[in-house]
C-alpha cells in the first residue's frame, strides 16, 4: 500500500543467505513487486558457480564473501538447509551482524527458540514456512514472531511473502502440521494429478490433453473453494448427480480408503517435520 513504510529503511539493504531456488524466488518477487530495488538487494550462495548463476538471473550482487555487507543490512532472509544453520549463525555472529537486523528463517524444523540460541544475540527473529508454488506467485506461507520481533517487523515479513502468494500469521504450535500440509502438500497434489493423468491415458486420452484437463480442473476446484467460501463437501454435491458417473467414481475412491490414506500421509509428515530440528546422531 502507498502509505506503508519501506520494507527496508533508507540506506539499508535486504540480504539472502542461500540463493537457491526459494531464495531467488523470494528476491525476484520482492524486486518485481517494487518492494525493494536492485541497489537494496544482495545475496550469497555455497559455491562460486551458484553465485554467478544467481547474480546473472537476478541482476544483484551474489557473492561468496558478504561480511562487508552486513553492517547496512536491515533484513536478512535465511534460506539454507537446517543442517547448515549452526555454521551460518556462527559466521554471522563472528562477522559483526548488527543487533537490529531483522532475521527471517524459512528453515523447516528449527523453532524460534533454536534460532535465537544458535545466533546467540538479541536480534529479532521471524520463522516462516513457504512452499514451492511461490515460484509462480501462488505460494502459501505462514509466519510467527520470535521473542524480540515487533508487530511492525511481523508486518514487514508478511509483505515479503505476500509478494509471492498468500501469507498468514499463526501460532508456532501449528508449524509442524503446516509443514506437512502446505509445505509438503504440492508433492501430494502432483502425485494425485499424475495418477489422474495416467487414468485419462488408460481410458483413451492423449497424455498432453489428459494433463491439461487435470491441471486446470485442480486449479478451478481450488479457486471455487477460495471464492465461494463453501465447504468442499457442498461443492462436491453440486457435481454429484443421482445415478451419475461422479457418484460411481467417488464410491471407488472411498473403497480405496482415500481419506484415511491422505490423512496418514499428513500425520507421518508432521512427525518427521517435528524431528528436523533435532541434532543428528552419529
Image: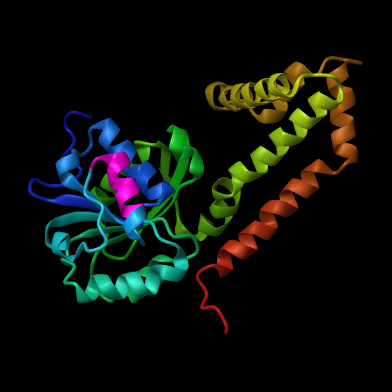
Residue 113 seen by the camera: no
Query: Where residue 100 sits: x, y (%)?
Result: 17, 62
The image shows a total of numbered marks equal to 0
Closer to the camera, 258 or 62? 62
At 24% from the left and 40% from the top, the residue drawn is: 59
Q: Is residue 60 magenta?
A: no
Query: Where residue 203 sits: x, y (%)?
Result: 86, 22
At 48% from the left and 41% from the top, the residue drawn is: 140
> Is residue 144 shown above or below 209?
below
Furthest-left residue in view? Answer: 11
Q: From the image, give the main secondary structure of the stretch colored magenta.
A: helix
Q: Quadrant of residue 192?
A: top right
Q: Quadrant of residue 251?
A: top right
At 17% from the left and 56% from the top, the residue drawn is: 73
Query: Where residue 30 sits: x, y (%)?
Result: 29, 38
Furthest-bottom residue in view? Answer: 282
Closer to the camera, 5 or 133? 133
Q: Quadrant of the N terminus?
A: top left
Report the side of 7 relative to 47 (left or right).
left
Query: Where residue 97 sits: x, y (%)?
Result: 19, 68
Closer to the camera, 272 or 19? 19
> Is residue 240 shown above or below 164?
above
Q: Quadrant of the C terminus?
A: bottom right
Furthest-front residue in view? Answer: 49
The magenta span reads: 50-59
Residue 112 seen by the camera: yes
> Is residue 185 shown above or below 273?
above
> Is residue 187 shown above or below 128?
above
At 87% from the left and 18% from the top, the residue drawn is: 245
Amino acid at each position: 500500500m502507498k502509505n506503508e513504510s519501506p520494507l527496508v529503511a533508507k540506506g539499508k539493504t535486504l540480504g539472502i543467505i542461500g540463493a537457491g531456488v526459494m531464495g531467488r524466488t523470494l528476491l525476484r518477487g520482492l524486486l518485481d513487486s517494487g518492494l525493494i530495488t536492485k541497489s537494496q538487494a544482495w545475496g550469497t550462495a555455497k559455491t562460486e558457480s551458484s553465485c554467478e548463476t544467481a547474480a546473472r538471473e537476478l541482476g544483484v550482487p551474489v557473492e561468496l564473501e558478504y561480511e562487508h555487507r552486513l553492517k547496512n543490512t536491515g533484513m536478512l532472509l535465511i534460506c539454507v538447509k537446517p543442517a547448515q544453520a549452526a555454521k551460518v549463525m556462527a559466521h554471522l555472529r563472528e562477522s559483526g551482524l548488527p543487533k537490529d537486523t531483522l532475521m527471517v528463517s524459512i528453515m523447516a524444523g528449527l523453532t524460534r527458540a533454536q534460532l535465537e540460541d544458535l545466533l546467540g544475540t538479541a536480534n529479532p527473529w521471524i520463522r516462516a514456512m513457504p512452499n514451492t508454488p511461490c515460484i509462480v506467485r501462488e505460494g502459501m506461507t505462514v509466519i510467527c514472531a520470535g521473542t524480540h520481533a515487533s508487530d511492525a517487523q511481523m508486518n514487514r515479513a508478511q509483505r515479503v511473502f505476500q509478494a509471492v502468494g498468500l501469507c498468514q500469521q499463526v501460532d508456532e504450535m501449528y508449524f509442524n502440521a503446516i509443514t506437512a500440509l502446505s509445505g509438503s502438500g504440492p508433492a501430494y497434489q502432483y502425485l494425485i494429478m499424475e495418477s489422474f493423468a495416467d487414468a485419462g491415458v488408460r481410458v483413451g486420452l492423449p497424455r498432453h490433453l489428459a494433463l491439461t484437463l487435470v491441471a486446470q480442473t485442480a486449479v478451478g476446484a481450488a479457486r471455487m473453494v477460495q471464492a465461494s467460501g463453501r465447504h468442499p463437501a457442498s461443492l462436491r454435491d453440486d457435481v454429484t448427480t443421482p445415478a451419475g458417473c461422479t457418484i460411481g467414481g467417488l464410491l471407488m475412491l472411498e473403497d480405496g480408503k482415500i481419506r484415511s490414506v491422505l490423512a496418514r500421509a499428513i500425520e507421518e509428515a508432521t512427525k518427521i517435520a517435528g524431528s528436523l530440528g533435532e541434532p543428528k546422531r552419529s
